[in-house]
Image (cartoon, grey):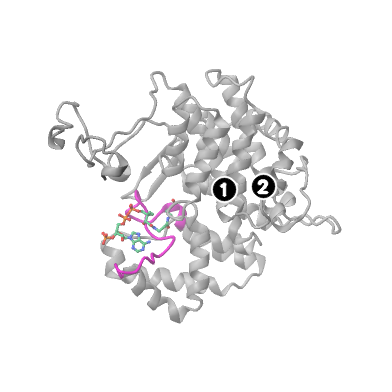
Amino acid sequence: CIDLSTLYKDTGHFTFDPGFGATASTKSAITYIDGDQGVLLYRGYPIEQLAEKSSFLEVAYLLLHGELPKKDEFAAFEHQITHHTMMHESLKNFFQGFHHDAHPMAMLAAAVASLSAFYHDDLNVDDPEDRKLAAIRLIAKMPTIAAACYRYSIGWPFRYPRNNLEYVSRFLHMMFEVPSEPLQLNPVAAKALDLLFILHADHEQNASTSTVRLVGSTGANPYASIAAGITALWGPAHGGANEAVLKMLEEIGTPDQVEKAVLRAKDKNDNFRLMGFGHRVYKNFDPRAKIIREMTHKVLGELGVNDPLLEVAVKLEEAALKDDYFVERKLYPNVDFYSGIIYKALNIPTEMFTVMFAIARTAGWIAHWIEQHETPGSRIGRPRQLYVGSGVRDYVPADKR
Ligand code: ACO
């Protein structure tokens, strides 16, 4: 019989780190986070500066190439993105197989995985040009596929991408255009969505990015790798939190119910958590949450939206920040706490919130996938385990058990 206590003695250096709280799985030059100070940099640029001065497509270029683009470089990048926005006509057939009330994240993951069935034969993951093309295709097609997920779910015909529009406006047009009505694009909505996309574009080795890298480490097709990232993002502890926050705020309903919610969140016999609170890395304010909080008031004001849930959210934040339980555990609002209120003001349905996140994070995911393939000596990701099961035992025939 194996003595389990001796099992891991001769394996050299071996760490047990559930949830990878203290383990760096890779080196990366893309994004820097200082969780204690609440600092987030993309390629060295503070998120606050990018949020104020840049655009999502420029940030996507920065994440992919490591430098901000010169004017002609940006024009060429935008041109390439614009010319890859269409999804293959056959891909439309995939949607017909989904039940009418399928969650858009389920459809998105499946549709993006199916891109690997369209772009595979001539794709060489070791060729930098092929990798670049995969990145362009993904960033370009993601809004088209995302809008198709929404329109399928409400039974509307898909819209083709209008390539004379900019990235975010093109997406809003595909989402919301009603054939019988003249196209009306709200510049405030486009600007707000672009800003949210910047804030969500990358966040180093979170669960979904690590998933993309793990799948990518096997040499898998990039579209399959990104589809795996989408499924990881969907969970409520990760990107699904934005949808969960809004449902929680609706459930709380009114500011006078906030105290009860805080009490529930502290009760260890209750599974209820304050969604949009806490972060593995930030033990200080999430800098993205600060930007979004400010922006929420501004956007709702500019759009003339008076959402009572904003008052509930503000009260909840105030109550939690004063409460010892949250203070001791350094639980602050994260990026998802206020983003849902903005999405709601932009008429984006709750089930589409995590899809919005996925469109933006695609830039980060594919930048990491490229970095991984550019790094000499990259190895397959292969975590170990501590075995705690039975020692060796003999098979017992069914009639003797
Ligand atoms: N509400 C109440 N208590 C919480 C919360 C919360 N939102 N988050 C953490 N805690 C408590 C835990 O119960 C635990 O308490 P204990 O020490 O008494 O056992 C302590 O704080 C530490 O929590 P962990 O779960 O160990 O922290 P971890 O780093 O593993 O999890 C996570 C981080 C998943 C973000 C967590 O804070 C959470 O579930 N938050 C709510 C979901 C959410 O907003 N997710 C989005 C994260 S941002 C993003 O992915 C885009």
Q: Which residues are magenta?
A: 267-289
Question: Please, is residue 277 above or below residue 33 in the view?
Answer: below
* Residue contact between numbered discs 1 and 2, judged by CB atoms under 8 Å: yes
Which kind of residue does numbered mark 1 sit on?
Answer: Phe
The C terminus appears in which quarter of the rendering? top left
Question: Please, is residue 280 above or below residue 304 in the view?
Answer: above
Q: Residue at x 17, y 32 (%)?
A: 7
| Left or right relative to 6: residue 42 | right
Circle 2: is it few (<14), some (14-19), or many (20+) Cα within 10 Å?
Answer: many
Give the mark nearer the N terminus: 1 vs 2.
Answer: 2
Q: Residue at x 51, y 37 (%)?
A: 365
Question: Please, is residue 209 above or below residue 236 in the view?
Answer: above
Distance from Cα at disc 1 to Cα at disc 2 = 9 Å
- Residue indicated by mark 2: 168
Residue 262, given in percent of the width and then of the height, sits at: 37, 72
Residue nearer the viewer, 99 or 214: 99
Ligand 1 falls in quadrant: bottom left
- Residue indicated by mark 1: 197
* Residue 246 seen anywhere in this rendered image of the structure: yes
| Left or right relative to 255: residue 161 | right
Task: Say the numbered circle drawn on residue 183.
Answer: none
Which residue of the protein is positioned furthest toward the right in this rendering?
Answer: 180
